[in-house]
Image: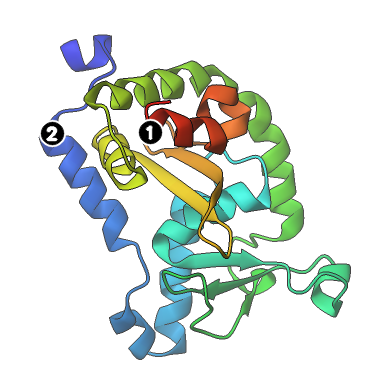
Amino acid sequence: EMEIKYDLISSNKRSFMQKQEADLAVSPKRLQAGKSEVKRSITNVLDHVIDKYKYTSLNELNAVLGLYNVKADRGVEGGRIYTSRGLTYVVINNGGAPLTKPIKASSFYNKPTLDLIERKAEENKKLREPYKLKLKNKIEWSFKSKPETFTEFAKELKKERISLVIRRSEKGQVYGLTYIDHNYKTVFKGSDLGKDYAANRIVERLKGL
């Protein structure tokens, strides 16, 4: 009753859910098992993410998919796949490089095409709004322990079942942050939460400025 009233999750339940989510990631073992196992593994990830998470763009969707080593790819801008509004899915490594050949969205049973993704992204703009304040409160709570680095900050967020996706320039500078709340299945860019949660401001807060 207390968990429901105060929106809490027990540590045992949290650990169980985190293990379930981690098990979805496409591992090297699955890659070695062949094409059919790769497609099945990607399908499992898509089933877990496409309909459940509230993303509002393809980039936000990829922030979630990337946690499971999967990427939705439109191809090179101006290329055949891009101009025909095609979409493929591929397994990636931790650096974002593809490890498998792309598989067309239309070949998956649930047809996670670009049209579907864009329709859901538009619907999610309203659906995720009620959870914005909850996420901001969790981020503020994570700063109570006074993290000084992004590693420490991400570790504190993880305790709240929030994944932090960091975008860096080639020189290593942080220029974008995406917060993924696994409790409410919401995805927000830092700038969408407010200036205090955008990359530049978080860098300042971590340095104590």
* Kind of residue sitting beneath label 1: Leu
Q: 94 left or right of 79?
A: left
Q: Secondary structure at mark 2?
A: helix
Residue 142 image position (x, y, % from top left): 30, 27
Q: Is any part of residue 8 visible from this angle?
A: yes
Residue 189 image position (x, y, % from top left): 58, 37
Residue drawn at the location 47% of the way across and 38% of the way down: 179
Residue 96 image position (x, y, % from top left): 51, 70
For mark 2, does the 10 Å Cα neighbourhood hold few (<14), some (14 to 19), or many (20 or more) residues? Answer: few
Residue 84: name its quadrant: bottom right
Which of pointers 1 and 2 indicates the residue nearer the eye?
A: 1
* Residue farthest left in this picture: 12
The N terminus: image quadrant: top left
Q: 103 left or right of 63?
A: right
* Kind of residue sitting beneath label 2: Ser
Badge 1 or badge 2: first in the primary sequence: 2
* Residue farthest front in this picture: 209
Q: Are marks 1 and 2 in contact (CB under 8 Å)?
A: no
In the picture shown, does residue 75 fall above or below 165?
below
In the picture shown, does residue 7 fall above or below 92?
above
- Of residue 180 and residue 52, the one placed in the foreground of this image is 180
Residue drawn at the location 47% of the way across and 69% of the way down: 42
Q: 130 left or right of 45?
A: right
Which residue is denoted by mark 1 in the rendering? 206
- Of residue 194 and residue 92, the one placed in the foreground of this image is 194
Q: Which numbered marker is on residue 11?
A: 2
Residue drawn at the location 50% of the way across and 59% of the way down: 172
